[in-house]
Amino acid sequence: MPPVAAYPVVPMLYFDHNATTPLCTAAREAWLEASEQFVGNPSSPHRLGARADRALADAREQLAAYLGCGPLDIVWTSGATESNNLVMHHYAQALDPLKEVWLSAIEHPCVIESAQRHFGDRVRTLPVTAGGGLDVDALREWLSEKRPGLIAVMAANNETGVLQPWTEVHDLCLSHKVPFFCDAAQWIGKLPAKGLGECDFVSGCAHKFGGPKGVGFLKCPSNGPVRSQLVGGPQEEGRRAGTENVASVLSMMAALKERETLLIESDTQEKKAWRNAFVMSLAGAKILGQGEGRLWNTVTALLPGDCRARWVVKLDKAGFAVSTGSACASGKEAPSHVLTAMGIDADETDRVVRFSSGWETTAEDWQALAKGVHTVGQELTD
């Protein structure tokens, strides 16, 4: 049997961190160490099982401290997609059958689609402004007329990087006694996690901040039942059946510790300045969310030309990995629901490209990207 052909190793500058991040050194070392030290099943009664269970408990306390919640609020999952589906599964059983679920129009597809599966026409979409932020005035008006069973608004948008007013939404939910769910997958590791634990439900995943793929968490209330989506075991206080991935959880926490330390010791304003200098180099481009608070690592631009796919392919050949938007929505023929919600014409959405950097990205990397975009732009317009 002939050997499987391997992809050639080509030097690339990686600008698709919002899709997934490279595994950081701290996470890799933590995973290797945990794989050797904690071989037991955390549910087993012997000492090796108890050691693994203790390691999970310590990790729970660490994450709770970052979020600002109790350790028993934390449920380990396979990632934000599972966590988000778990929230909708729970409320499908917990809510009054007449109650609605309100989602921002720019939620991740796994939130929108799981809500639609469970609630159908009881899903109501909250509008956003042209800048890509939730229209809080519209939400306030709606709440004056009706009280839903759940409101879901993400912390930061994955496609545009626009920061959402989740603290303000949380306060509104609190005053109207409505449960609040916040998908914080893009926020955590780029901005401080402190305060997110005050939300009723918060989801996150390791691979967005330098941890391994396939592990994440859901912060949920510990003072009431959470209807498990996965059944067949008593793990996670009955909220999520299945043997916990101890090594990946500890790897995730090592990555988060590194990112939270960087947020204290490093100047994200400098990184934002590098991004802004890149934006200034994009002649003829429209920057989505410009003027709004955005993640320091993200630029989403409506570029000149006729097709974003050509931009992505040509930049890839030039040595730059970039994206057309949400990795979970790529390949779909319909325009991005995020761009549609922002009022971008359908014929323009096909020219939107996202650039997202990481903690390791340098000023020189951004400068090289600017030159690459300029070169490709000349090729496409000649």
Image (tube, rainbow, N blue to C red):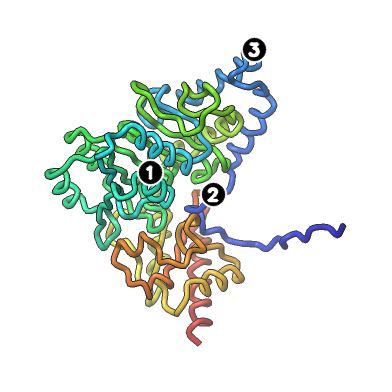
Quadrant housing the N terminus: bottom right
Disc 3, disc 1: CB below 8 Å?
Answer: no
> Tag 3, which secondary structure?
helix
> Tag 1, which secondary structure?
helix
Residue positioned 45% across, 27% down in the render: 239
Horizontally, residue 274 falls left or right of residue 46, namely left
Residue ID for mark 2: 21
Q: What residue type is labelled 3?
A: Arg
Q: Which residue is most to the right?
A: 1
Q: What residue type is labelled 1?
A: His
Q: Which mark is residue 118?
A: 1
Q: Which residue is most to the bottom?
A: 382
User: In this rendering, is residue 224 above or below 81?
Assistant: above
C-alpha gap between disc 3 and disc 1: 42 Å
Foreground mark, 3 or 1, reads: 1
Residue 306, image x, y percentages: 45, 79
Q: What residue type is labelled 2?
A: Thr
Foreground mark, 3 or 2, reads: 3
Q: Which residue is most to the top?
A: 46
Residue ID for mark 3: 47
Residue 9, image x, y percentages: 70, 60
C-alpha gap between disc 3 and disc 2: 35 Å
